[in-house]
Amino acid sequence: MNVHFSAARQNWLSEQVSAGKFASIDDAVAWAIEGMIHFADDEFDWARPLLDKADASLGRGEGIPGDEFLARLERRLDALR
């Protein structure tokens, strides 16, 4: 099989191999495909434990109202600006 990449993607892949992140471009592409397969197969099953944890936290009254969260977020963003 032949796969063609844009020049920018080819350069990025080559840089990843040169940096030692992958042994070859083939390895980099195989890694990406494996990630896509896993992601497609689980249909966000990976998120279920996180959602369950958040739901339990809210059940214990540990959450804050959305408008309060947004106000806090806005203040933090203002401080960073």
Image: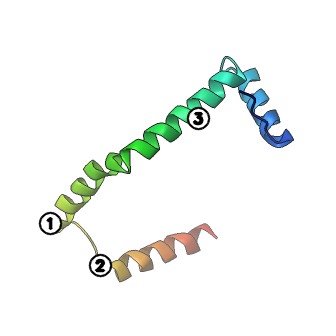
The tag on residue 45 is none
User: What residue does disc 3 label?
Assistant: 32
Residue 60: which quarter of the image? Answer: bottom left
User: What residue does disc 1 label?
Assistant: 59
Q: Which of marks 2 and 3 is in front?
A: 3
- Indicate the amino acid at tag 2: Pro
Q: Is residue 77 above or below residue 1?
A: below
Question: Quarter holding the N terminus?
Answer: top right
Question: Residue at point 77% right, 36% down?
Answer: 12
Q: Give the crowd class for mark 3: few <14, some 14-19, many >=20 residues within 10 Å.
A: few
Relative placement, left or right, of 34 versus 13 is: left
Residue 65: percent from left, percent from top = 29, 78
- Indicate the amino acid at tag 3: Ala
Q: In this view, does 53 lie above or below 63?
A: above
Residue 30: percent from left, percent from top = 59, 27
Question: Residue at point 71% right, 28% down?
Answer: 16
Q: Which of marks 3 and 1 is in front?
A: 3
